[in-house]
């Protein structure tokens, strides 16, 4: 995601767009993603008027397990499609 993918509409609400990849995420996943380590995205999240994510703690714990024990991409590429299998 790039900072140029954000704008304000006529009512002052934040709009997010990225036409190279289109997908739908639940508010829980979108909020968790925006409240990550990048200060810009965290500041964008503060303007979205979303309620606190009740799943945030659980999502953080699952992330730790996936990072330590599994492929964090779950075998998917950046578009959410299965990665091509490589022959060894």
Image (spheres, rainbow, N blue to C red):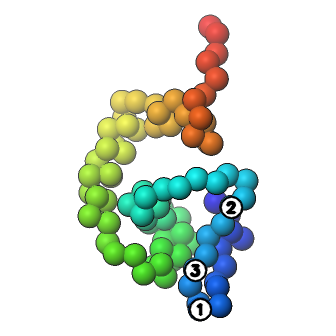
Disc assigned to residue 11: 1
Q: Is residue 68 above or below residue 14?
A: above
Q: Quadrant of residue 2?
A: bottom right
Residue 55: % across, % down: 28, 58
Q: Quadrant of the N terminus?
A: bottom right
Asked if one can make out residue 32 in the rendered structure from this viewpoint, the answer is no
- Could you tell me which secondary element the residue under label 1 belongs to? loop
The count of marks equals 3
Q: Tell whether label 3 touches label 1 (CB within 8 Å).
A: no
Q: Tell whether label 2 touches label 1 (CB within 8 Å).
A: no
Mark toward the viewer: 1 or 3? 1
Name the one closer to the observer, 4 or 11.
11
Q: Name the residue at 53% across, 65% down.
A: 38
User: Which residue in the structure is indicated by mark 3?
Assistant: 14
Q: Quadrant of the C terminus?
A: top right
User: Which residue in the structure is indicated by mark 2?
Assistant: 18
Compute the Cα span from label 2 to label 3: 14 Å
Q: Is residue 61 left or right of residue 49?
A: left
Q: Is residue 57 above or below residue 51?
A: above
**Labels 1 and 2: the sequence-earlier one:** 1
């Amino acid at each position: 995601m790039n900072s140029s993918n954000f704008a304000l509409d006529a009512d002052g609400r934040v709009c997010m767009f990225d036409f190279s990849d289109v997908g739908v995420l639940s508010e829980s996943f979108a909020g968790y993603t925006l409240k990550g380590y990048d200060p810009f995205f965290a500041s964008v999240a503060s303007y979205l008027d979303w309620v606190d994510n009740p799943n945030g703690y659980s999502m953080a714990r699952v992330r730790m397990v996936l990072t330590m024990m599994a492929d964090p991409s779950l075998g998917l590429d950046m578009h959410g499609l299965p990665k091509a299998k490589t022959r060894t």
